Each structure stands twice: as C-alpha cells, then as structure tokens.
Amino acid sequence: MTRPSSAQIDLTALRNNYQVARRLHGGRALAVVKANAYGHGAIACVQSLQSVADGFAVAIPGEAFELRAAAIHSPILVMEGFFDAEDLRCIVEQNIWTVIHQNSQIDLLEAADLPANSLHVWLKVDSGMHRAGFSLDEIQAIYHRIKRCSAVASLTLMTHFARSDEPDSDATARQIASFDRATEGLAGDRSLANSGGVLAWPAARRDWARAGIMIYGADPIPEAGNDLKPVMTLKSQIFAVRNIAAGEPVGYGAKFIASRPTRVGLVAIGYADGYPRGAPNGTPVSVDGRLTQLIGRVSMDMLTVDLTDLPEARIGSRVELWGNQIDINQVAQLAGTISYELLCNVKRVTKIYI
C-alpha cells in the first residue's frame, strides 16, 4: 500500500453488533451482507460471523453463489429471489433459501422439475410499503398455491417496514397489524424486523430478524443510544500543508473563503474513494485524535481540512473521516444522504481487517 488511505474493519465490533441484534430480538437473526456487506467485504464479514450467526441474507442470487463458492455453508436467504429458471435451479442445487414476492416467480417454480422438499421459501407480504410483495387480500391464496408445490420444504412469512427508523410514526404499528390480520391461521415462521424493527418495535420481534445496517454500527435510530460499535473506520493522512491569507479561496468553485490566515491540510482521499462530494464546509474530521473540519469542496482524489488550530498537525498526521470518533450518521446528514450509501460507496481504499 503506497497511498495512505484505508478502511479499517473491526470484526470484533461486527460480532458484538450482531449479538446485540440477536439478544434484543430474541429468536433467530439473519445477518444481512448484501452489497458486499454494505461495503465492508462480504466474505471476510461472513467468515467472522458464521460461528455466531443463525444465517445470512443477500439481495441477489449471485451474492449467495459467491458465498457458497467461498465455502460458506450456513443458511443464506436471497431477498430479491430468483430472476429466471436457471437461478432457481442453482438455488436448489446450492441449498439456498429464496424470497418469493411476485407471481412470475411462482410460475417458474410450478414449471420447474425440482426434487421434493428441496426449497425453503420466504413469502413476502406487502403490508404497506408498496414496493415488493403480495397484497394483503391475496396472501392466503398465494400461500396455499405455493404449498401445493412439491419442491417446497418450508414457508416463512415475511414483510418489510418502510418507516421503522421513525419511532414517533405509527406506520410500523399499522404494518404489523395488517400483516398479522392477513396471515392469520397460516402455519410457518414469521420475519418482520429489519434493524429499525429490532431496535424500536418489540411487537415486530418474531421468529427471524433481518439485521442489516445495525450490525455495521451505523445506528438507524442514533438518538436511542443503542450499544452499537462502528465497524468501519475510514482513514487517511495529511500529505501536504500550506498557508493561505484571509480572503483567499480553497478548492473548486471557491466554496470556502478563509476568514483568517488559515493553515490548510491536504488529505489523500476523495469522492472516488467513497467520501461524499456533497459534504459541506464544517463537516467534522479528526486529525491525530483532535476534531477539526472540512474546508472547500471535496475533490475526486483529495480533500482539504483546517489545521489552523492544530499546530502539531503535519505531513503524515492521521485523519479519521468516520469511525469511533466521527459519527458516520452526522457526516451523512450534512452531505444530504444516509449512512447506508456512504458505506456502500467505499471503494479503491485498502480494507484492513482487525
């Protein structure tokens, strides 16, 4: 590694956060590792978790196949389900669980020549998010249609919340009630709680949780003070220092004009590495453990910070962009986005697992 930028991944924190999710939820919990484990590295994270996790969840079949190729034998759920008959065949061959959320998937299942009791299905109910899943008034008929397929070994009923990270909204309570009414009398496990459901909605805690963003320590409800630890620390170094006079600009577009003589540190990281271009002046940054702030527009490969009040800072000083000292939720909010996007966008930097 020649460029001093990295994403440090704390696997002990990852395991801690998963165990918090499982303890709060009760029952079993899938660790969601889609999108390369939210930018953390799926294979390394799964290998670290597989001794404690009840199973894993990914978005698409290819993500599940990659884990199987890496000798991961734990249960894996594909949350978008299969896209064609070949996907379905491979899912069965590799003993992967699948969500079914639309009629075209049932058509493929009914037409497939599969061994009896070879497929574990999670049936998705649209309880109010209106993105994917079967409507409340058809779920009873859909359930029995799938049960008639000889390949189906088990059926788990699931739904997904649209606003579980808003504890003051009654939308989640309405979704829970709608789901329960629509699935009354149907046998099988239930899975309602995503991270927000685990943290804020006890009524959503059923047989299976699907813990995503919370296991990476980016709390979706930070004001609740949950015992979650940041897993990723995005780090770099100061690699140049210069002084500018009051009234001088810094960076593209002159978005920062110095109000005093200013000592500027150049940091070896930018939006091509995943740091948000939209982060404004004043976004917190840590240099050698002391707080300062971003100044000037974030560039593709570098950004600038204010070192005026940090006289000890120099070339080689350590910079934290988010992690244990800088809250990723605060960076995301200032940049007009969410922590999920920041984590998923991390690229080009070296991942260091501890």
Image: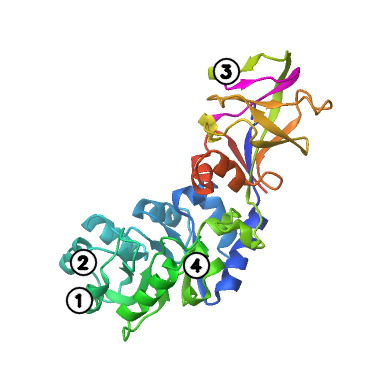
Q: Residues within 10 Å of mark 3 (few under 14, many from 20)?
A: few
Q: Mark 4 highlights which residue? A: 197
Give the Cα distance between marks 4 and 1.
Answer: 29 Å
Residue at 56 percent across and 66 percent down: it is: 199
Mark in front: 4 vs 2: 4
Secondary structure, mark 3, is helix
The residue type indicated by label 1 comes to: Arg
Q: x and y percent of residue 263 in the render?
A: 75, 20
Magenta residue check for 256: yes
Residue 333: x percent and y percent? 55, 44
Above or below 349: residue 246? above
Q: CA distance from mark 4 to mark 3?
A: 44 Å
Q: CA distance from mark 1 to mark 3?
A: 63 Å
Q: Which residues are magenta?
A: 255-270
Q: Is residue 341 left or right of residue 132?
A: right
- Asked if marks 4 and 2 touch (Cβ < 8 Å), the reply is no
Which label number is shown at residue 106?
Answer: 2
Instruction: Kindly identify which residue carries mark 3.
Output: 254
Question: Tag 4, which secondary structure?
Answer: helix
Q: For residue 132, what is the image quadrant?
A: bottom left
Instruction: Compare marks 4 and 2 and give the one earlier in the sequence.
Output: 2
